[in-house]
Every structure is written in structure tokens, then in C-alpha cells.
Amino acid sequence: MRSPYADAVDLAGAHWHHSVVQSQLAKVLKSPHFRRSKRSQNLLRFVIEAALSGDQNALKERSIGTAVFDRVATYDTALDPIVRNAAIEVRKRLAQYYLEPEHVSELRIELPIGSYTPVFTAEAPAPEPPKPAGPDGGRSRRWIAAATVLLLAGVGIAFFWSGRRTPGSELEAFWEPLFRGRNTIQICIGQPTRLYRFIGPRSEDLNRLLGRPAASDREVAPVSVESGELSWVAPEYMFLRDGLAGFKVASWLQSKGHAYQLVSVSQTDYSRLRRAPMVAIGAFNNAWSMRVTSELRFVFEYRTGGGTNYHSIIDRRNPNAASWNVAEPVAGAMTEDYAIVTRVFDPATEQTVISAAGIKSYGSFAASEFVTQAEYVGAALQSAPKDWRRQNVQFVLGTKIIDGTPGPPRVLAAHFW
């Protein structure tokens, strides 16, 4: 007989009794991911109970706002996104819960993006009960036993080969979260933050006086420049090595048959990132990289010490430990740069982001090599947790600079969560 609540939720071809779903809900709500958030608990409990009872009207945004968050029935959902924000938080907490190995085989509760109707799925359907043996049941059982042995042998061989970790497979696994939806991947390239052009009647004179490289044996008379003689033109330019890093990522994506779009940071807005996963190139010149990494373990910071200013990478878990620094301004030729490679699910956009971000553009280029060459990722993941594919990842990289060219990326630190 058809389950009376089968239409309320997508059960992926299976019919789950209320008690099974409610038991799983109780287990999820007791987990550390939900235990400290009453708002997430209340929203998840409400939508599941509404879905199981078949009350589709209760699963609309306005209905949830009034029932769960005490909003008046006429409140403006466009101005008050409390339900949408709470749903983002619930999706993040559910994703974290099911990343843990002990929960992988449990009944899975999901809240699809763009919907408040929960979806319940399982890793595999329950086996059908065995049928009674007929007159030749003994012979049938022997054939079943033989087939089972062959099946298990095949599974063992398949498991052996699938379990082999090769650099190529590790690199594919690193990118896999961005490939799931087959959406066009945005490659967001950082740009200079301070870049101006002379304008006005004195522009040619100012260019002639100030546009030439300085020389130690040449004295330059002080020149007064008015604010009206400068035009901010940073959005029209990007650093060469940042552009090359973006092209390297684009070339790799194209070789794997994935669509991409190269955009500058000035062209990238929040609505664009809600629709597609992103690769962010650059750190201090890319606001999206800075925002994505700002609350993580390894972050970029501007520091001052001993009378010197630094652009730095610090470990927020060990704030007093040595950090990786580049002095500002750089005196002479740079000899080393540092970068953070991050792969993280961003709850604000509900998309996975990869950030290949160097303190300077040398580091960004080295980071782009790291995320597109199998041998670098494969070596870095040799000591990674077995379930790293389901986790967020950060790597701190260093690169030596010789004759103005960044060398191979070296992993200095790593974090999985």
C-alpha cells in the first residue's frame, strides 16, 4: 500500500516510516553540530515534521518565518531573510554531520538549495527478504553461494584498484566538489588596489617627470599633484603573474572538459557567486579570497613589527608561533613568497570555493601550479586523513624566487576539518 506521506518528501524510491525519520532526526539534533544552535534545531525539526505530515503550505518561506521565528504573517521576506539564512546554516551543519565517517551509512537528511522540503536518502536500499526454497532449493542455494563468492572476489578486486591512491586521482578528488553541478566555474582574478593615471592639462608633464624609473644619481625636484589630476584605473588592470595563474587554472579545467569563465575581482559580485563555484586567484588584491579565508585557521593579515610593515600568513590556532611574512614595501628583489591554497564550502554562497592566493603574485602563480599538477597535490595528501575528500582543506605553501621566477611550491603546513 502506498505510504500516506510519500508525496511529502523525496524518498529516493524508498518509503521510510515516521519512526525511522524521527529517530534519525533525534540523532542529528543531539550531535555537536546542532546541539548549540536552537535556531537550526527548530528549523530542521519543523520542516521534517511538516514534510512527514504532508503539509506543503507549511514549507513556504513566509509560513516558516511565522511558525518558527515569530514573524508576523505579513512580514516582507525580501527585507527579512531570516529563514534563508537559517536554512544556509542548517545545510552547513548537516554537511558537517555527514562528513564524519560514523554517520556515512545513516539515513541522510538533506535540505536542497532553493527548497525547504527535506529529502531523505540512504547509501543503499535494504535487501529484500529471501524467498522460500523450491523443490530444487539445495541446488539453487549452491548456485547462489558460488555466485556470491565470485561477486565478493570482484568487489575485492574493484576495492583494491579504487583504493589505490595515485597523484592523478588525488587531484581529481581535490576538484570534485566544484565539478558536481556541471556549472560554469568562475575564475576570479585579483587586481591592483592602488593604481592611478594622470589626467588634465598637466598629464604629459607629470608623466615625463614622474613616469621614469628613479635613479640614485638623479635628483628629482618635489612635484605637487592635486587630487583632481589623478584618476583611479585599478579595475582596468591585473598583475601579469596573477593573470598567468588564472590562465593555468583555465587550461586545466578545459583539459578536463569543464566550462569556466575568467573574470576580474571588480566584475565579480555576490549574485554571480550564488550561481556557480569559484576559484579565487590572489590574496590582498582579491576581496573574495580574503573573505573566504578570514575565519579559517590560516589567514592573511597586515602586521607591524620592529618598525617594519608586513603582509603575513598566520596560524590562528597558534597566534604566537612564527608566521610567514613579506616586508612592505619590498626592499630589493624578492627571494621568497608564500601562499594559502584553500578548498572550502562557503555557507554564504552555498558553493565550494578554491582559493589559490599568494601574498604577492609569485605565490599566487605557485599556488596555481599546485592545484593543477597531480604530483604536487598527490605528495601533499600522502599523510592526509582517509576521509579528506569529504573535508575542507588548507595548505600553506612557500616558493623560492630565482631571477624573478617562482620555483616549485613547497607545503609548509596543512589543515583538514
Image (tube, helix red, strand yellow):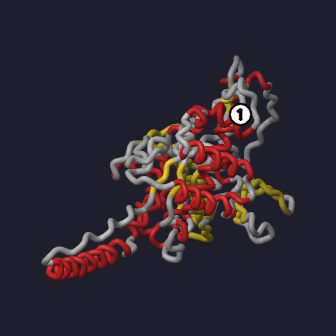
Q: Which image quadrant: the C terminus?
A: bottom right
Q: Position of residue 99 (x, y in %)?
A: 55, 63
Residue ID at (34%, 71%): 162
Amino acid under disc 1:
Thr
Q: Position of residue 255 (x, y in %)?
A: 34, 51
Q: In the displayed structure, would residue 201 be above or below residue 292? A: above
Q: Position of residue 262 (x, y in %)?
A: 47, 40
Is residue 59 or residue 239 the one in the foreground? 59
Is residue 330 or residue 357 the one in the foreground? 357
Residue ID at (70%, 37%): 67
Q: Position of residue 14 (x, y in %)?
A: 40, 54
Residue pointed to by mark 1:
66
Q: In the displayed structure, would residue 210 be above or below residue 1? A: above
Q: Name the outermost residue toward the right.
A: 307
Residue ID at (59%, 61%): 97
Q: Secondary structure at mark 1?
A: helix
| Quarter of the view holding residue 164 | bottom left
Is residue 134 or residue 204 the one in the foreground? 134
Q: Name the outermost residue toward the top.
A: 201
Residue 337 in sight: no
Q: In the displayed structure, would residue 68 be above or below residue 35? A: above
Side of 339 where 324 appears, left or right: right
Count of picture labels:
1
Residue ID at (72%, 63%): 314
Residue 263 in sight: yes
Side of 101 where 29 appears, left or right: right
Is residue 232 or residue 332 the one in the foreground? 232
Mark 1: few/some/many CA within 10 Å (<14, 14-19, 20+) = some
| Quarter of the view holding residue 66 | top right
